Amino acid sequence: MGRLDGKVAIITGSTSGMGRDTAYLFAKEGAKVVVTGRNEARAKAVVDKIKEEGGEAIYVLADTADRSAAKVIYDETMKAYGTVDILINNAGVLSLTPVQQITLEEWDKVFNVNLTSALLLTQYCEPELKKNKGHIVNISSVAGTAAKWGPIAYCTSKFAMVGMTRAMAREMGPDIHVNGIEPGAIMTAMLENCGADATIEFMKTTAPLQRVGKGSEIATACLFFCTEDSSFITGQLLRVDGGVDA
Ligand SMILES: NC(=O)c1ccc[n+]([C@@H]2O[C@H](COP(=O)([O-])OP(=O)(O)OC[C@H]3O[C@@H](n4cnc5c(N)ncnc54)[C@H](OP(=O)(O)O)[C@@H]3O)[C@@H](O)[C@H]2O)c1
């Protein structure tokens, strides 16, 4: 028996990285998983693997930089499974552009993907989540508490994700639990594309656990927040970062 048997879980940004690992874990635990992202080949591969292993999943292609994406994800979920129990707001994009160079176009894209899409999807899902006493997990970052981890747009969007998690928890209790995770350096495509070698070295020499993290280590934290194990926890942000700021 799985810990999420019969639950329907939307996991945004689950074609890759920690979202994909969360999709695999949740499917193994019995959830019907809605995989989302823009890349069809990767989305299909995730769903195929889940099904090969006896799980249940669909994929919905949607670019969350576009504000209409949330409705598409919600509508397709309802069409396939008729309800939503869990929403993992994980899709994210990195921006390394400094203050003087960032354009409003890039700023808006980062905010739409990292933050606004999470708000919109939450708005659509709230009635079902409320009915089901469901769970939301928002993926922020260590860049959501300290500017040393990311330049202006990324850092600001991740700080905002912390505030949004707390505000949602306050407004949406008692029926919906809302928590967040602040990952440190996790070995995914995002990290590989922005200088993984330097980060690996940095973590080895400065973090108590002396390594970068794995996507599966974020997946288990998401699972904790979506089960009875966290029944008296809401509005919290859990750092999963190898202790780098300890
Ligand atoms: N890796 C780290 O060290 C780290 C640290 C702290 C926080 N985080 C956060 O963790 C989350 C997951 O990142 P990751 O490291 O797993 O990165 P990743 O492997 O690059 O995965 C990012 C996911 O987001 C999706 N995505 C990106 N832009 C999108 C868009 N415009 N529309 C729809 N989906 C989009 C991607 O799907 P498609 O490519 O298919 O569109 C992909 O599934 C992000 O919110 C990130 O900010 C990561």
Image: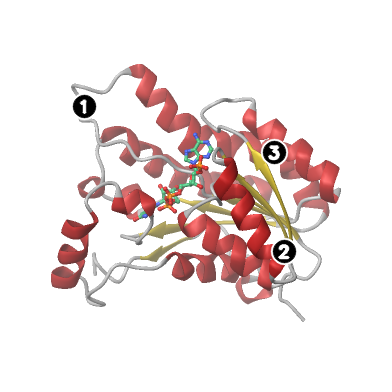
* Observer able to see residue 242: yes
- Which quarter of the figure is the C terminus placed in? bottom left
- Mark 3–mark 2 Cα distance, whole angstroms, equals 20 Å
Residue 74: x %, y % from top left: 73, 39
Quadrant of residue 53 within the rendered picture: bottom right
Residue 71: x %, y % from top left: 71, 31
Quadrant of residue 40 within the rendered picture: top right
Residue pointed to by mark 2:
51
Q: Residue furthest left?
A: 205
Residue at image point 28% right, 71% down: 243
Residue at image point 47% right, 59% down: 18
Q: How is the protein colored in the picture?
A: secondary structure
Residue pointed to by mark 3:
73
Q: Secondary structure at mark 1?
A: loop
Q: Secondary structure at mark 3?
A: helix
Residue 202: x %, y % from top left: 16, 63
